[in-house]
Amino acid sequence: MPLFALILLLALWAAVFYQVSQERASAVRDAVAVSQSLARTLADHTSFTLRQTDHATQLFKLKYEETDGGLRLNEFTRRQGLLDSVLPSKLALPIALIDAQGNVTDSANAYFPENLAKQAFFRALAANTSDTALVDTPMLDAGSKHWTIRLARRLNDAQGGFAGAIIIHVDPTYFVDDYDRLNLDAQGALMLVARDSGLTVGRIGEQLILSDRIDFRMPGAPRHAPEELLIEPPVDATARIYSYRELSRYPLLAVVGVSRAVALTRFEHRRLAYVGALLAASVLIAGFTALLMRQSARLRRSIRQAKETQALLRAAHQGSLDAVLLLKAWRPAPGKPVEDFIFADVNERAADMLGKPRSELLGQRVLPQVPLLRGERFFKRFVLVMETGQPLEDEFELTLASGGTRWLRHQVVPITDGVAVTSRDISARKHDELALQDNRSFLQSLIDHLPVLVYVKSARPENFGKMEVWNKAAEDITGHLAADVIGKTDCQAFPPGFGLHDAEDDRAILAERGVIEHTEKPLRLRDGSLRYLRAVSVPVFDERQQIEHILCIAEDISQRRQQELELRQKQAELAAVNDASPLGLVRLDRQRRCTYVNRTFESITGLPRAAALGAGWTSALHPDDYPLMHVALEQLTRSHAPFQSTLRCLQPDGRLVWVSVKIAPILIDGQIEGYVGSLDDITTLRESEVALLESEARLRTIADTLPAMVAYIDAEQIYRFLNIAYEREFGLTGRLALGSSVRETVGEARYRTVAPYIERVLAGETLSFEEEDEKEGIERCMEVIYIPQIGEDKLQVAGFHVMRQDITVQKREKQRLLKLAQVDALTGLSNRAGFQQKLSDAMHASRQQQHLMAVMYMDIDRFKPVNDTHGHGTGDALLRAFAQRLTQTMRVTDIIARLGGDEFTIIMEQIAKPDDAALLAEKVVAAMQQPFELDGITVRISASIGLAFYRAEDIPPAVLLQRADVLLYQAKQEGRNTYRVGAAVL
């Protein structure tokens, strides 16, 4: 019966809808015919006006040429004149007369530019001798800012040559404004459209429209009439039916639109009548059918509800992710204590967990089937829950018979004379929690054992300044234990004036949001001793870019500062040594002006230092010896060879002093940057020899006290000089090393390493490089400088100087700080700085090897709702779990980084083809659709990815990352949980 009634209703509704659709199509065709008729009328009116305007230009040309150019516009346009004979006088059309040079000689009804010679229509008329009017597409008049249709005709002189042109401008709004021949409704529209430019002039009701942004489309058969138009976008909110008519001689379309609502009014009345009758018939049929079905429905309802309830309960029971057991108490006799339970029901997951088919368990006693449940954790608790009626929950680790372990979440609920037991395997979550605890312990151990002072303060408003991290190095350096500092502010933990009381630095970090560094921060300890720290304070931002913590790293530089102080003292001592030297020392610049003399120079020459500076040092020479010094300096400049001679000095008091003078150039990269000279008073030979020996001893002492290894090797690679540091490095004495070759001294293996550098320095190149070696099982990094020594011939390298210095500590510290600065503390992935460095390196390698690489830019969809709903702790746990799953999904060689917040990037190098990267992106999207279990909270998110490729393009890393970001934005715009791939680079 219901099927028959349904078929009857469908037939009635189908027949009515078919009739309605036919009448709607007929009404639309009638509306199209009406609008087509109106469009034809508008086209005829417009064509007539334009033809009459054309006749007006032809009439002016005829009269103009008959009067040999004597006709003027005031005569032509006067009332009841020639122009009124072809056009209505109310039009007042703008008209202008132009001579052969393009000058406007006369005009009426509008302003025209003084010269139109450069315009295209004028050049066309001048070049074409035909007597045809030139009609332009509607255009914007530069002077009036109105749209006009320009008609221009050539004027000839008596010899048939070009004499100018007559121009008439027609306003297109005339054809549609106040035109009463079209019987339009209040919402009707009529328009004129330029076929070339798309300009539209029209009227909708009482409103004039003028636009070049309206686009017409002719859909055509079969759904639309041939003359019907569609407008995109619509001009207003009123739906209309448009038709058009082309103007045969002009580039215009006449378009008329009738309101669809008005055109279909009669049809709508008939449609409502049809629908009302159909609804009435449907109600009658449905009521009759419902009356017949009422009794049978009542009869089946109770049976169906019982079956549905039973099926729902069974489906929920069997489909549960947990193992569910319904246990009924078993007693040896009524009234006796419970000694066992019987399996009343178990689901398939419970049967799998117990390792037996469900059919074998139902109705059986529990303890013989599962002896494991005899333990206190199970049987006694089941009895306790049943007797007390209080549910019980527990998590525990279960040792399996196979030797493995499994973590279970146990829930026991009392039922009638039994218990319902629900168990869930939480091994994966529990293992993740334990691993997270291990990671936190490792990170804490790492921070505690760093050799630098590390402490972290909260920057949150509710507990600003409270210390959260204080490592072992901080305890050792400051003497303040972590238990006495953590949880307190600076004012609470430290005494007034303590060096780590950084209230001003904290305010500066909040204001500037940048790193603050103190190269030397004094720290007065409890015992009164003073230490100096090199401290860096870094703001740590949360996902909202708010400063959450302030990380402070400080290094105890007290020893290094003391060493630097000692070095400055030694430099001062060296200056004192120079002043105490028995040789008079002088230093000249490139222009041979004196920049330094020691006190011995003053003593030998009798000139005070102020008088010797500049060119004054030459006044100490005997007048007869000055020319010799001048010639020697000129030769030294050319040869770079040291100059040595015996000269006389004449002191101001007339005393004559004999001196041994030696001047050598200061060479840097083969260029003379100055001169160094020495004067030895040889008035008494004995005094001279003693002074020479003392000078050599002092210079040797200076070289031996330098921390760097210094040596001189000649062109034959033979050691000619080395200081004590150099001897200690190779375990040699001066006697054994001097005269030995480099190969013999350093050994064959090291010689193969330094041989290329020796060849380069002997070719005249100054070198500075780092060298890694191992001594007594300790890896070291040495800074090595090779400086060539040019021979007297100015062509050959006589040898080279070697300076080697151990920079292992500085190198390791730099690498450690760089690594710390490039790791994201939350996820353990690379941070933005590390990613930018690795991306730059990867792009460089891709250019060098011509390998294809790709960059993924992704973020987590709907991450903010997780933070807002469950808190930042869950948000951080989600970021860590996301990073872990991302690491497991990608290749081992891929570089994964967290830029900040929920944004992640992946660098994929040496990709065989673009499809491989796309497959990985699809794999990541699929992996992130799986739920995340976070401390008992199930979170579902997804990921959106932008994938950009790179190979050998000359672009910076920022451009490649921006391309991936744009693709990520496209993926977001298209619904999230997807990826978008950029164009592959060939």
Image (tube, grey):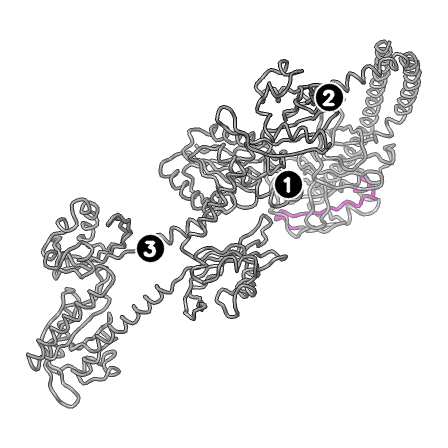
How far across and down, in percent of the image, does residue 486 sit?
54, 57
Q: How many marks are shown on the rendered structure?
A: 3
Q: Amino acid at mark 2?
A: Leu
Say if the magenta span includes residue 512: no
Q: Is residue 424 above or below residue 142?
A: above
How far across and down, in percent of the image, does residue 668 sit?
24, 62
Q: Is residue 809 left or right of residue 489?
A: left
How far across and down, in percent of the image, does residue 78 sit?
81, 47
Which is nearer the N-term, disc 3 or disc 2? 2
- Name the residue that disc number 2 marks: 313
Disc 1, SS? helix
Mark sitting on residue 809: 3
Q: Is residue 894 above or below residue 336?
A: below
* Closer-to-camera residue (86/111): 111
Name the front one of labels 3 and 2: 2
Q: Amino acid at mark 3?
A: Val
| Span highlighted in magenta in the image | 83-103
How far across and down, in percent of the image, does residue 39 sit?
80, 29
